[in-house]
Amino acid sequence: ELIKHETYDKNRWQEAADACLEAINAAHGAGYALYTKYGDPVKDYKAAVTEFPDIDANGTAKGNPEIIWGTRPADSYASE
């Protein structure tokens, strides 16, 4: 089991950055985005959690383009 690399390789950071950008672009291509009402990360977070307090059964809130809650398995909560 690999816990850490024995040698430093700055290319690993580039590979990680490339993978993150690929994931972000895929999310944008699917219509998802971070909730950015104010352009300030702290204010945007506060707005997202106060303006969308009722997450529906699919883990999304109407009008919120984020997919942050979207990893919940459908049967992990009691049926509604």
Image (cartoon, grey):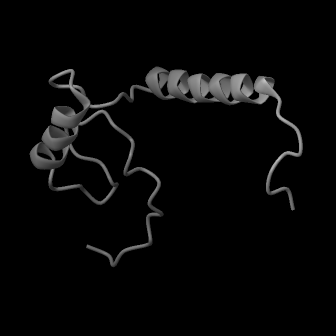
Q: Decide which of 59, 16 is in the foreground and name it.
A: 16
Q: Is residue 47 left or right of residue 26?
A: left
Report the residue that reaches farthest toward the front.
Answer: 7
Residue at 45% from the left image edge and 23% from the top image edge: 28
Q: Is residue 58 above or below residue 45?
A: below
Q: Decide which of 59, 49 is in the foreground and name it.
A: 49
**Which quadrant holds residue 78?**
bottom left
Residue at 82% from the left image edge and 34% from the top image edge: 8
Report the residue that reaches farthest toward the left.
Answer: 51
Q: Is residue 65 left or right of residue 76?
A: left
Measured as percent of width and height from the top left, residue 12 is found at 77, 30
**Which quadrant holds residue 26?**
top right
Residue at 14% from the left image edge and 54% from the top image edge: 53
* Count of numbered labels shown in the rendering: 0
* Quadrant where the image shows the N terminus: bottom right
Measured as percent of width and height from the top left, residue 24 is found at 51, 26
Q: Is residue 2 left or right of residue 76?
A: right
Q: Is residue 28 above or below residue 53?
A: above
Q: Decide which of 27, 78 is in the foreground and name it.
A: 27
Residue at 43% from the left image edge and 72% from the top image edge: 76
* Quadrant where the image shows the C terminus: bottom left
Measured as percent of width and height from the top left, residue 64 is found at 24, 36
**Which quadrant holds residue 3?**
bottom right
Measured as percent of width and height from the top left, residue 32 is found at 39, 29
Q: Is residue 26 left or right of residue 55?
A: right
